[in-house]
Amino acid sequence: MLLAQSDLRSLTVFRAVVEHKSFLGAQIALGLSQSAVSFHIKALEDRLGFKLCQRGRSGFELTDRGAIVHERSKGLFLALNAFESDIGALKNRITGTLRLGLVDNTITDSDLPIHRVIARISERAPEARVELAIDTPDALLSEIANGGLDIALLPETQPYQGLKLSRFREEIHSLYCAQGHPLFRQAEAELTIEHIETFDFVVRPYANMRELQFFPKARARAIASNMEAQAMFVMSGHYLGYLPDHYARDWVQKGRFRQLMPNETRIHSTFVIATRSTEKPSTILDFFIRELAGIASEAVHMGHSVAPGNATRM
């Protein structure tokens, strides 16, 4: 089968349908109508000569052949991106697409100003494109491994075959309560580990209960899929939870949140840069890493480095 430009467009739509697990998700992501998405899937199926997916009341589901096509398409689009990058390099220009993954609510972190890196790409590499995805650490690692992302910044995790994890920086997390919680007005001198752990905690599953390392008898009565959800539980006034200090700072300044025993129970979460270890970095990926390192170096010299303390890594 000789691929045409229309086939690549239909493959792009097909990949969006798979990645968003629905035609509706692909419509929103690509800005297409329902009929346009259906047209591309039908056109691709006609070209290939077999069904790619089933769509009905039970939802969206790939056929066995559709799953194989999706898997093979990852290598195709990686190769196309690498080709575009190499051609740009021959012309002394930075081109191609950078697919970046982040965990949620890093936008308030002054030590991780991704917006500044994006601005520099726009200014110095206007022909390049940036795609940004926000997801859980496990999902980001999976996307790096299967070719869905080129790079991700996420909390440190166990090593994975085929992935390169480079330590980058640390993020401070403290335990918080909100207005309405019994501990919000309690005197600092009266707070103890034993007293705090009698209250209900909210935790994130991907943190693997490390949020309770200082509170061995604490009860994890609520589960949050991400940091914003965790903050909502804390804001209810019925739960205690760990949040990044940069994320909670505004609520603290407004008198709505309070840190609990920060010097004794603070946690350092080490962030890593995740990439595929066997792949030569594209020009846009190399540019992004260099700019990120430069901005991180600026932050250190300006005194934004992580403060020492009685902390452990998360």
Image (cartoon, rainbow, N blue to C red):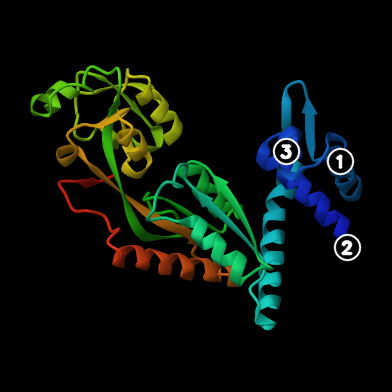
5 up-or-down from 92: above or below:
above
Q: Which residue is mark 2?
A: 2
| Residue positioned 66% across, 42% down in the render | 19
Secondary structure of the residue carrying numbered label 1: helix
Badge 2, how many Cα within 10 Å: few under 14, some, many 20+?
Answer: few
Q: In the rendered structure, which amino acid carries the disc numbered 3?
A: Ile
168 up-or-down from 196: above or below:
below
Q: Which residue is mark 1?
A: 36
Q: Is residue 291 left or right of residue 185?
A: right
Badge 3, how many Cα within 10 Å: few under 14, some, many 20+?
Answer: few
Report the disc number at residue 116: none
Q: Residue furthest front?
A: 254
Question: Quick one: 302 or 240, which is closer to the camera?
Answer: 302
Q: Which residue is mark 3?
A: 28
Please report whichever mark, 2 or 3, sits nearer to the chain's N-terminal start.
2
Please report whichever mark, 1 or 3, sits nearer to the chain's N-terminal start.
3
| Residue positioned 23% across, 17% down in the render | 182
Image quadrant for the N terminus?
A: bottom right
186 up-or-down from 164: above or below:
above
Please report whichever mark, 1 or 2, sits nearer to the chain's N-terminal start.
2
Say whether residue 209 is visible. Answer: no
Secondary structure of the residue carrying numbered label 2: loop
Whether residues under marks 1 and 3 lie with C-beta atoms below 8 angstroms apart, the answer is no
| Residue positioned 76% across, 38% down in the render | 27
- Residue 193 image position (x, y, % from top left): 14, 28
Q: In the rendered structure, which amino acid carries the disc numbered 2?
A: Leu
Q: Is residue 151 left or right of residue 174?
A: right
| Residue positioned 39% across, 30% down in the render | 231
Q: CA distance from mark 2 to mark 3?
A: 30 Å
